[in-house]
Amino acid sequence: MPSDRAAGAAAREIVIEVLRYRSETDLKPLPQAFRVPFTDDMSVLQALQYIKDYLDGSLSFRWSCRMAICGSCGMMIDAQPKLACMTFVRDYYPGPLTVEPLAHFPIERDLVVTVGGFVKKIESIYPYLIPKTQRSLDEGEYLQTPLQLARYETFSDCINCMLCYAACPQFGENPDFIGPGAMALLQRYNDDSRDGAQAMRMDLVHTDNGAWSCTAVGNCSEVCPKQVDPANAVNQNKTKSALDFFLRFLGHPLYLEHTASDGDKP
Amino acid sequence: MSRSRPYIRPVETLWWARPPYLAYTLREATGVAVLGYALVLLAGVVSLANGERAYNVWLDFLKSPWSLSLHVLFLIGMIAHTWTWFRILPKTMPRLVIGRRVLPQIRVTAAGVAVAAASFIFIVLVAVWTQP
Amino acid sequence: MLAALIGPALVLLTGLAAPTGIGLTNNFMSFARAMAFAQHPLGKLILFGVILLFIWHGAERIYLTLRDMHAGAKFPLMWICYGTAGVLTLITMGALATIGF
C-alpha cells in the first residue's frame, strides 16, 4: 500500500494483466493491464485490492479470510492455480504478472467463476456421517483413537478452494467428472470409523464420472494448498471399484450393506 | 441487474504436451515400450512355432543394429516405467498406519523400487547361472 | 506391476545380452533351448503371462494417452486399442498351442 512505503524509498512497480469479463458489455474475456506499486510483503490479493481501491473499482473477485483457510481466492496466477492471498507479488517481479479466473470453470464476471456445479458434487456424496447402527444418547459419544483419525484426517483438511479442479486436465475435458475435491470429501467419510455408508458412496465412484475419469495425472495433489492429497482419494477408489467389480459375485464382502432411509438425512 | 451469461473457455487441445502435464504424458508413453517389447517376444514365439528356420530369422533380427537400438530404447522406457509405477503406487493405496504414524508415501516408493532392483538382479543371476 | 518388476531385466537379457553375446553366451536363446522352454508347462505359462500382461497394460496406457490427445472418439478408440490386444492374445495362444508340449 502507498502509505506503507519506507520514507525515501521508491516503491517498485509491477504490471498486472487481469482477464476482464463483464457479460453485459463483453462478448469474450480480454486482458487489462494495471501498473501496481508493491512492497515485499504484499500478496496478489492485496494487489487486486489496490487495483479495486485506486485504479478500477469495477474489478470483481472473491476473497474473505486472506489467510488461506476460506478457499475463496483461488485463481490462475501466471497460469498456475493458486490462492491469491498466499501468493506474493515479489516472486513475480519484474513481471508482467498474469491473473485469470480459475481454469475449467465458466467465468461469471472478471475473476469470479461459477461454482454451482462443484457445490452440487459436494452435496451428492452424502457428506455427513451415516452410522452403521443407530445409537441412543445413553450409549454416549462415539470413541475414536488417534490411529483411526489418522486414516482420514488429511482428507478433512479440504477448504473447497477448487484449485485441484483447475489443475485436473480430465475435469477440463469432462466437467461431469466428480473431481478430486469431492472424492477427497467422500474418502473423508468412507475412512471415518464412525461411518457405515461406504456402499452408498461407492455407487457414485463406480461410474465413468466417478473414479474412472481419473488417469492419475496427480497434479491435483501438487497444487493443493492444504496437502489434502486428493489424488490418493480418487485412486484408492479406483482400486476399491475394481475389487468391488470382481468381488460382487461373492456378495460384497468389503462393504456393509446399507439402504438409504429418511434417517440418513440431516 | 444484468442477466448472467457465463463464459466457457475452450479446453486447450495440446494441454498434454505442455508442462506440468508433459511429464505425465511421458510417463504414460512408457506403455509403448512395454507393448513394443511384448510384440518382439510375440514375434519370437510365432517364429518358434514355425520351425527352426523361421526362429533363426528372428534371432538374426535381434542381432541387427535396428533391434539393438530399439531394445536400448525399450530398456530406458522400462526403467522409466518401473520408477513412475512405484511413484504412483502409494496413491492407489489407503493410508497405511504403522504404529502411531501414517507411513509417508515415499517409503512405499522406496520399498517398491528396492524390490524391483532385487528382482532385476535375481533374474539376471538366474539367466547367467542357467546359460549353456 | 509385472512389467515394473521384470521388464528391465527381460529387455536387457533377451534384447541386448543374448544377441550380442556380452554377459551371456551366444546360444542362450538357441532354437533347442527356446523349444525346450516353450514346451515345458511352466515355460509356456511364463511366456503366456508375460506377453499377455505386457500387451494389455501397454494397450490401456496407449488408449488413455490417445484419448488425452483427442485422437478420436471414445468407443472407436477403445475398439481399436483393446481389439488389437484381443487379436494379439489369440495369436499368442495359437502360437503357444502349436509349439505343443
Image (tube, coloured by chain):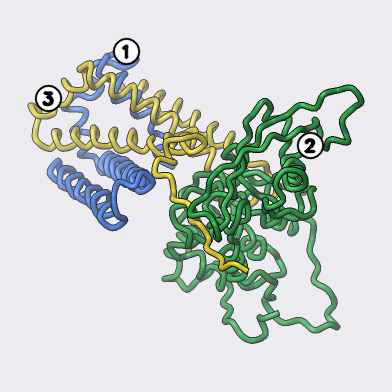
Chain colours: A green, B yellow, C blue
C-alpha separation, residue under disc 3 versus residue under disc 2: 70 Å
Residue ID for mark 2: A42
Residue C48, horizontal then vertical, whole percent: 27, 44
Chain letter of mark 3 equals: B
- Residue linked to disc 3: B57
Q: Residue at x 66, y 65 (%)?
A: A189
The amino acid beneath tag 2 is Met
The residue mark sitting in front, 3 or 2, is 2
The number of numbered badges drawn on the structure is 3
Query: Is the residue marked by circle 1 packed among few (<14), some (14-19), or many (20+) residues within 10 Å?
Result: few
- The residue lying at 42 percent from left, 34 percent from top is B26
Closest to the camera, between mark 1 and mark 2, is 2
Residues under labels 1 and 2: Cα distance? 63 Å
Residue marked by disc 1: C22
Dot 1 falls on a residue whose secondary structure is loop
Q: Are marks 3 and 2 on the same chain?
A: no
Q: Quadrant of the N terminus of chain C?
A: top left
In this view, the residue farthest toward the right is A7
Residue A74, placed above or below residue C11? below
A15 shown above or below A134:
above
In percent of width and height, residue A266 lies at 71, 79
- Residue B39 seen: yes
Quarter in which the C terminus of chain C is drawn? top left
Q: Quadrant of residue A24?
A: bottom right
The crowd level at tag 2 (other Cα within 10 Å; few <14, some 14-19, many 20+) is some
Is C59 on the left or on the right of A190, as rendered? left
Q: Residue at x 43, y 62 (%)?
A: A208
Left or right, A30 with respect to C58, comes to: right
Say if residue B94 shows up in the picture.
no
Residue under the point 24% across and 22% down? B67
